[in-house]
């Protein structure tokens, strides 16, 4: 029983990331009708926003320590962060330690602008082109973004730790009456799950309870009619692209303590997130969220030793097996809308 | 009156055909003068540096490229000469190789065997490379080694730690300077026993390919021989990213040691996540829970940050070694690039010089002459003390380093400390050792 609870917990944070990326993908597909293969790259750019903030806060001046030598035998150069000079060593270190949550404030405007530039500069030219063209151009864009990040940050994963206050793990099992160490769960993963819940609730509330959201939903259902009412739906859809980019970006920011960011991390999530969208149902926001958590948890279960010993390699293919099963039994996905991608 | 059937045109035709016929042997002789693949004929010779520039081992690959470029500079007489000044063989004098300047082309293996083979093939067929150097990841190295054997060029394997590279998959045209899984186990065993005792329960997470399998087998053999119990070995996919599903069950398994048979980005992620799960702070079976990373690199240590502190592992070479060869290389590399070289960089640098030296001593670029010059070659002055390239399996034997993550680093390069330099004799093994069985070097292939 404790193993099952453990894998459900493990699936939650992975599912949270899938759900957040799939939510953005669905928003873009539902509004603009574009299959955006660059969405994983936006998740990765978000993660590198956290790296950037960490580096900005770590900007240093050099002092020479004559008593120590560097690897070439020269006097050692020691980097002292400016923030330590401005706010004192303790406060300076605390700021650097909290660079990941602080990066959210940096990532939101950066991602909205990036999303806006992507949509206006490139993707809008492909609205009337076949989905294959859209996939090719956005996939190419993802590769370009990845290479730019690699050229500036290198190919190695960059450690981006969580604030010291959230290091360590929660002994969840003791709460539930199990033995000590039976079910442990890192604090930051709990934070990530709660954070994703807030973001998902925020997006749904925005679409459900604001006039802007109402117009967007109406546009998703019948773009032409909304246009005939004199509403500039294209402008709103462009803003939705920016919003989807921001959701992917903040998801990437908060994921960095779980997975040290590297230029290729977007690709790893992209394919899985597309499967999530298909399983959830193209164009269905609740479907994307439901499928994200479902597949995240199933993937965790498939990684259990007991399951792998029965079905070797199942952890690598479980998501695709589920996708095949869902598409055979429910061709529109779990919560797919009629008429979407059926022309 | 006699009429002749000879016409001027007929004589010319016949003469032309006869001349062509007589010239045929000469044409074939000229063709067969190229006695081996890509025999250099001009004033230069070309090397192929085939390393991962993208993928999970990309950072190692880029450092290998830096070192290879430096080696070419030193061979061509540019710079301070680096290890040429300390190398016990004095055949090289900084004027190229056998009077030819060294050039190079680079390729991206992407840490994928099929891509690496295609890249090496292009280097041999299109660019005319006489030697291929590099190949991070044992899967890649074994694939490219096989290709070089078929093509008739020399392969100097790079960052490959699987026992199989010079075990069951050894080839006459291939050599390995790097150490292997068996040697890591032999070096780490006594240190682990001293640090953690003889009653431990180990849980292995292992990269699911040739390197992971052979390293795990080697470490398990050593730890079980000193009394440790192996609780479980779980194979994990390369590039999994999130290892939490594999790490979460560890504490509940009764294990008190986690051995991460991962490398590169995978090791950075699995170690970071293991620390996040609080494993290093836990107490199990009345003992502190410990994590071991059998194969270390400086780049991985930098990527893992503070998570590496106090964690044991092994290395082929480290820039902190006190010998003259290491100092010369670190100075050259550090002054050119501004940071110390990694172990991967050292391996590829040394291999480039060793190949050039073998050609010079043999007096020929013929791969079979180079093989003969390298087989059983003993030298010094390249770091790690006296070194042997064993003729029977083309494995290099030298001292091995046991490392530990620095507890209180004083600067950004202070990530690992040398715990012990394990003498070569302790890591040597018989060429027919069961972990290396089933291989056959075969015959040298000069190609052409």
Image (cartoon, coloured by chain):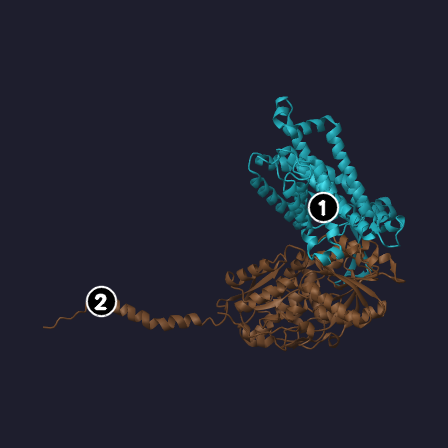
Q: Quadrant of residue A242?
A: top right
Q: Chain of mark 1?
A: A
* Residue at x 40%, y 71% (from the top left corner): B28
Labels 2, 1: front one: 1
Q: Report x, y in % for residue A140.
A: 59, 45
Say if residue B366 shows up in the picture: yes
Which residue is nearer to you in this view: A282 or A59?
A282
Residue B428 lies left or right of residue B355; in this view the side is right
For the C terminus of chain A, give its image quadrant. top right
Q: Report x, y in % for residue A85.
A: 84, 47
* Residue at x 77%, y 71% (from the top left corner): B222
Determine crowd level at label 1: few under 14, some 14-19, many 20+ residues with C-alpha closer than 10 A.
many
Q: Report x, y in % for residue A179.
A: 89, 54
Find the distance from the CA under tag 2 to the CA under tag 1.
84 Å
Q: Which residue is mark 1?
A: A295
Q: Quadrant of residue B419?
A: bottom right
For label 2, the SS is helix
Q: Chain of mark 2?
A: B
* Residue at x 29%, y 71% (from the top left corner): B18
Which residue is nearer to you in this view: B222 or A245?
B222
Residue at the extreme top: A229
Residue at the extreme front: A329
Q: Which residue is mark 2?
A: B10
Q: Report x, y in % for residue B104.
A: 57, 62
Residues indicated by labels 2 and 1 sit on the same polypeptide chain: no
Chain letter, cyan: A
For label 1, the SS is helix
Colour in which chain B is drawn: brown
Residue B408 lies left or right of residue B149; in this view the side is right
Determine crowd level at label 2: few under 14, some 14-19, many 20+ residues with C-alpha closer than 10 A.
few
Which residue is nearer to you in this view: B12 or B116?
B116
Number of numbered markers = 2
């Amino acid at each position: 029983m404790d193993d099952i609870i453990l894998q459900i917990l493990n699936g939650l944070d992975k599912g949270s990331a899938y759900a957040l990326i799939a939510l953005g993908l669905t928003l873009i597909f539902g509004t603009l009708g574009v299959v955006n293969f660059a969405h994983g790259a936006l998740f990765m750019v978000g993660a590198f926003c956290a790296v950037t903030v960490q580096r900005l806060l770590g900007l240093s001046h050099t002092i020479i320590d004559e008593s120590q030598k560097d690897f070439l035998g020269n006097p050692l150069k020691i980097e002292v962060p400016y923030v330590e000079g401005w706010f004192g060593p303790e406060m300076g270190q605390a700021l650097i330690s909290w660079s990941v949550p602080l990066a959210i404030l940096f990532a939101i405007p950066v991602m909205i602008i990036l999303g806006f530039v992507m949509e206006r500069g490139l993707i809008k030219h492909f609205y009337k082109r076949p989905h294959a063209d859209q996939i090719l151009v956005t996939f190419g864009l993802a590769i370009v973004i990845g290479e730019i990040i690699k050229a500036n940050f290198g190919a190695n994963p960059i450690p981006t730790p969580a604030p010291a206050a959230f290091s360590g793990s929660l002994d969840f099992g003791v709460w539930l009456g199990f033995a000590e160490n039976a079910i442990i769960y890192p604090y930051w993963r709990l934070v990530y799950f709660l954070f994703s819940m807030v973001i998902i609730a925020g997006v749904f509330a925005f679409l459900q309870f604001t006039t802007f959201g109402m117009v967007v939903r109406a546009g998703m259902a019948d773009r032409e009619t909304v246009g005939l009412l004199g509403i500039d739906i294209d402008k709103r859809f462009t803003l939705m692209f920016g919003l989807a980019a921001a959701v992917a970006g903040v998801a990437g920011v908060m994921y960095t303590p779980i997975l040290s960011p590297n230029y290729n991390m977007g690709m790893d999530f992209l394919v899985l997130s597309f499967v999530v969208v298909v399983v959830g149902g193209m164009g269905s926001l609740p479907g994307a969220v439901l499928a994200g958590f479902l597949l995240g948890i199933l993937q965790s279960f498939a990684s259990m030793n007991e399951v792998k010993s029965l079905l070797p390699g199942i952890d690598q293919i479980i998501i695709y097996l589920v996708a095949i099963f869902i598409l055979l039994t429910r061709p529109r996905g779990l919560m797919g809308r009629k008429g979407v991608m059926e022309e | 009156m006699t009429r002749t059937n000879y016409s001027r045109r007929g004589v010319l035709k016949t003469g032309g055909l006869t001349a062509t016929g007589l010239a045929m042997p000469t044409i074939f002789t000229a063709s067969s003068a190229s006695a081996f693949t890509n025999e250099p004929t001009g004033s230069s010779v070309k090397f192929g540096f085939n390393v991962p520039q993208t993928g999970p081992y990309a950072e190692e690959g880029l450092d290998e490229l830096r070192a290879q470029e430096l080696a070419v500079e030193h061979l061509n007489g540019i710079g301070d000469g680096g290890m040429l000044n300390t190398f016990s063989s004095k055949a090289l004098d900084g004027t190229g190789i056998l009077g030819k300047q060294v050039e190079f082309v680079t390729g991206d293996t992407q840490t994928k065997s099929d891509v690496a083979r295609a890249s090496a093939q292009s280097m041999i067929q299109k660019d005319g490379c006489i030697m291929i150097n590099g190949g991070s990841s044992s899967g890649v190295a074994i694939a490219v080694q096989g290709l070089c054997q078929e093509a008739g060029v020399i392969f100097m394997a790079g960052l490959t730690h699987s026992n199989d590279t010079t075990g069951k998959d050894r080839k006459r045209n291939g050599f390995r300077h790097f150490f292997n899984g068996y040697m890591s186990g032999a070096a780490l065993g006594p240190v682990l026993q001293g640090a953690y005792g003889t009653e431990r329960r180990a849980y292995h997470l292992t990269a699911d390919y040739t390197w992971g399998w052979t390293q795990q087998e080697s470490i398990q053999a050593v730890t079980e021989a000193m009394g440790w119990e192996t609780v479980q070995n779980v194979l994990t996919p390369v590039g999994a990213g999130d290892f939490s599903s594999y790490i979460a069950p560890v504490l509940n398994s009764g294990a008190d040691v986690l051995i991460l048979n991962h490398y590169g980005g995978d090791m950075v992620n699995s170690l970071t996540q293991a620390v996040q799960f609080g494993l290093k702070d836990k107490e199990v079976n009345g003992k502190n829970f410990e994590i071991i990373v059998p194969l270390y690199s400086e780049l991985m240590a930098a990527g893992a940050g503070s998570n590496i502190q106090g964690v044991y592992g092994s290395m082929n070479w480290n820039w902190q070694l006190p010998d003259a060869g290491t100092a010369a290389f670190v100075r050259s590399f550090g002054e050119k690039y501004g940071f110390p070289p990694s172990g991967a960089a050292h391996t590829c640098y040394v291999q480039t010089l060793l190949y050039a030296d073998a050609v010079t001593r043999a007096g020929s670029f013929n791969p079979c002459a180079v093989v003969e010059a390298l087989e059983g070659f003993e030298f010094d002055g390249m770091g790690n003390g006296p070194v042997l390239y064993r003729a029977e399996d083309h494995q290099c034997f030298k001292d091995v380093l046991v490392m530990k993550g620095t507890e209180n680093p004083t600067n950004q390069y202070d990530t690992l400390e040398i715990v012990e330099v394990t003498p070569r004799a302790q890591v040597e093994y018989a060429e027919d050792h069961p972990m290396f069985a089933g291989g056959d070097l075969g015959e040298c292939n000069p190609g052409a």
